[in-house]
Image (cartoon, rainbow, N blue to C red):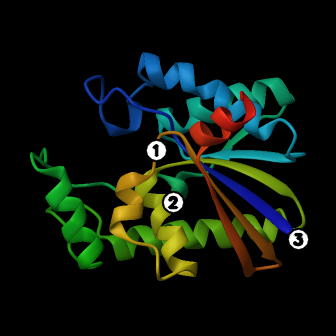
């Protein structure tokens, strides 16, 4: 069995840099130890990440603690929205979930992002068969991977996904077995009671 812990990044500061270089906010940095604590007993063999700074930085604390390098997988990156700033992001995102071919000029549609991310996952499953893997990723990219295996996943679930958040996916070879969705904040509350 191969177990992949997809980790949605902590809260980014979207006022600094461009999409690929947004750092974590102060709150995001404070939440990173939730990821490290969660992953510490999972016997992780390999740490992978999107090239985007917010995803990399979210798993970097765990990788350092575990003494593991982070392998950057370019195709796990988030979607490229387009060439212009989107004022009403909620409406844009909802339209994308309703029509996987919808995209803005210079951007990617959900179908393209899903194809890219699922192909990257297939390569990871072939290279790391039988391993436990942590992957720093993004909300939309992760949702589209989940939707590939579970077509009941909804826009509202994506909207409610906190930062950070974990989806534990289990595979037998390349065959999908199960998914467990893990809210690190609820888990932390239960563990601190």
* Residue 123 picture quarter: bottom right
Residue 100 higher or lower than 59, as above or below: below
The one of 188 and 170 positioned closer to us in this rendering: 188
- In contact (CB < 8 Å): disc 2 and disc 3: no
Q: Residues within 10 Å of mark 2 (few under 14, many from 20)?
A: many
Residue 101 higher or lower than 40, as above or below: below
The one of 33 and 130 positioned closer to us in this rendering: 33
Q: Residue at x 72, y 64 (%)?
A: 124
Q: Residue at x 54, y 52 (%)?
A: 74
Q: Residues within 10 Å of mark 1 (few under 14, many from 20)?
A: some
Task: Provide the residue designation for mark 2.
Answer: 142
- Of tags 1 and 3, which is closer to the observer? 1
Label 1 element class: loop
Residue 154, horizontal then vertical, whole percent: 39, 71
Distance CA(mark 2)–CA(mark 3): 20 Å
Label 2 element class: helix
Distance CA(mark 2)–CA(mark 1): 13 Å
Q: Is residue 105 visible?
A: yes
The one of 52 and 175 positioned closer to us in this rendering: 175
Q: Which label sits on residue 1?
A: 3
Residue 101, horizontal then vertical, whole percent: 25, 79
Residue 173, horizontal then vertical, whole percent: 83, 78
Q: Is residue 106 visible?
A: no
- In contact (CB < 8 Å): disc 1 and disc 3: no
Residue 135 higher or lower than 186, as above or below: below
Q: Residues within 10 Å of mark 3 (few under 14, many from 20)?
A: some
Q: Residue at x 48, y 25 (%)?
A: 28
Residue 50 higher or lower than 181, as above or below: above
Quadrant placement of the C terminus = top right
Residue at the top extreme? 26
Q: Which label sits on residue 162?
A: 1
Quadrant placement of the N terminus = bottom right
């Amino acid at each position: 069995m191969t177990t992949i812990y997809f980790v949605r990044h902590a809260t980014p500061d979207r006022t600094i840099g461009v999409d690929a270089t947004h750092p974590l906010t102060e709150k995001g940095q404070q939440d990173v130890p939730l990821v490290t604590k969660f992953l510490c007993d999972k016997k992780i063999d390999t740490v992978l990440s999107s090239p985007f700074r917010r995803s990399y930085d979210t798993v970097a604390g765990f990788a350092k603690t575990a003494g593991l390098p982070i392998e950057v997988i370019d195709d796990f990156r988030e979607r490229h929205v387009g060439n212009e700033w989107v004022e009403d992001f909620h409406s844009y995102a909802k339209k994308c979930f309703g029509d996987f071919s919808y995209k803005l000029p210079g951007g990617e549609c959900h179908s393209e992002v899903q194809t890219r991310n699922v192909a990257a996952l297939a390569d990871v499953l072939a290279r790391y068969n039988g391993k436990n893997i942590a992957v720093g990723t993004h909300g939309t990219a992760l949702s589209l991977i989940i939707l590939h295996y579970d077509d009941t996943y909804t826009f509202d679930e994506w909207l409610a996904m906190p930062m950070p958040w974990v989806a534990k996916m289990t595979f037998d070879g390349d065959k999908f077995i199960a998914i467990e969705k893990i809210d690190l904040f609820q888990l932390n509350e239960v563990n601190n009671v």
